Every structure is written in C-alpha cells, then in structure tokens.
Image (cartoon, helix red, strand yellow):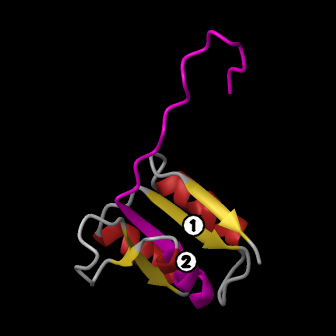
C-alpha cells in the first residue's frame, strides 16, 4: 500500500458473491454483517455467500460458479486452510483468498 499523502486511494473490492469454506459459525457471522445465503433473495441487494464445509466442496463450487472472494477456515475436515488457499490460487488466480481462524 502506498502511504504517501498524494497517493491514489486503494482499490476496493466489491463483493457480490463470496465462497465461505469451513466453520458454520462463520456463516452466522456473515449474515450478521449483512450478507445473505445465495439461495435466499432477501435482503435484496445484499451480497450473497455460498457455504461449504470441505476443500473438495470448495473446489467443486469454484468450478460451477463465479466468486468475487473465498474465505477459508484454517482447519477443515479434509485439509488445512493454507493448503486449500494455495490450490485455489493455482487454479483460480484471479480470485482473492483469505484464510481465517477463530
């Protein structure tokens, strides 16, 4: 990030569809933050998310649909979050990935 006073503002990522991988509690937190599950129409205009539990489900979801961002829990039933993040970056380099832990 450029911290000079005359630097242009950073580019903001507009998230309309997010893939959440791992902990169901994170889905609850996203709903509390104003996101909606992608299969629900309300609230209109709110960004949507798709929740899956495992890396295999995540890779399948990425193959079947477009996402603006992926949020991955550090601990998954079939791998670790950083490993899945590496795989996503290799196969879908344009999609930002964030690994979180709670």
31 vs 23, nearest the viewer: 31
Q: Position of residue 58 (x, y in %)?
A: 48, 76
32 vs 68, nearest the viewer: 32
Q: Position of residue 15 (x, y in %)?
A: 40, 55
In the image: residue 14, left or right of residue 53:
left
Residue 79 sits in quarter: bottom right
Q: Position of residue 20 (x, y in %)?
A: 51, 74
**Figure check: 57 above or below 64:** below
Q: Is residue 69 visible?
A: yes
Is disc 2 surrounded by few (<14), some (14 to 19) or many (20+) residues within 10 Å? Answer: many
Q: Which residues are magenta?
A: 1-30
Q: Quadrant of the C terminus?
A: bottom right
Q: Is residue 54 visible?
A: no
Q: Quadrant of the N terminus?
A: top right
Q: Is residue 20 magenta?
A: yes
Residue at position x 57%, y 57% from top?
Answer: 97
Q: Which mark is residue 21?
A: 2
Q: Is residue 18 magenta?
A: yes
- What residue did someone put label 1 on? 71
Residue at position x 62%, y 9% from top?
Answer: 6
Residue 82 sits in quarter: bottom right
CB under 8 Å between discs 1 and 2: yes
Which badge, 1 or 2, is on the more N-terminal residue? 2
Q: Position of residue 19 (x, y in %)?
A: 45, 70
In the image: residue 18, left or right of residue 39:
right
Distance (Cα) linking label 1 and label 2: 6 Å
In the image: residue 69, left or right of residue 44:
right
**Figure check: 93 above or below 86:** above
Is disc 1 surrounded by few (<14), some (14 to 19) or many (20+) residues within 10 Å? Answer: some
């Amino acid at each position: 990030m450029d911290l000079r006073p005359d630097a242009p503002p950073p580019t903001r990522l507009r998230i309309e569809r997010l893939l959440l991988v791992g902990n169901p509690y994170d889905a609850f937190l996203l709903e509390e933050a104003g996101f909606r599950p992608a299969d629900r129409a309300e609230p209109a205009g709110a960004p949507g998310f798709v929740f899956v539990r495992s890396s295999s489900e995540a890779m399948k979801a990425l193959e079947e649909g477009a996402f603006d961002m992926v949020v991955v829990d550090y601990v998954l039933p079939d791998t670790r979050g950083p490993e899945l993040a590496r795989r996503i970056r290799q196969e879908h380099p344009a999609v930002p990935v964030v690994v979180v832990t709670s």
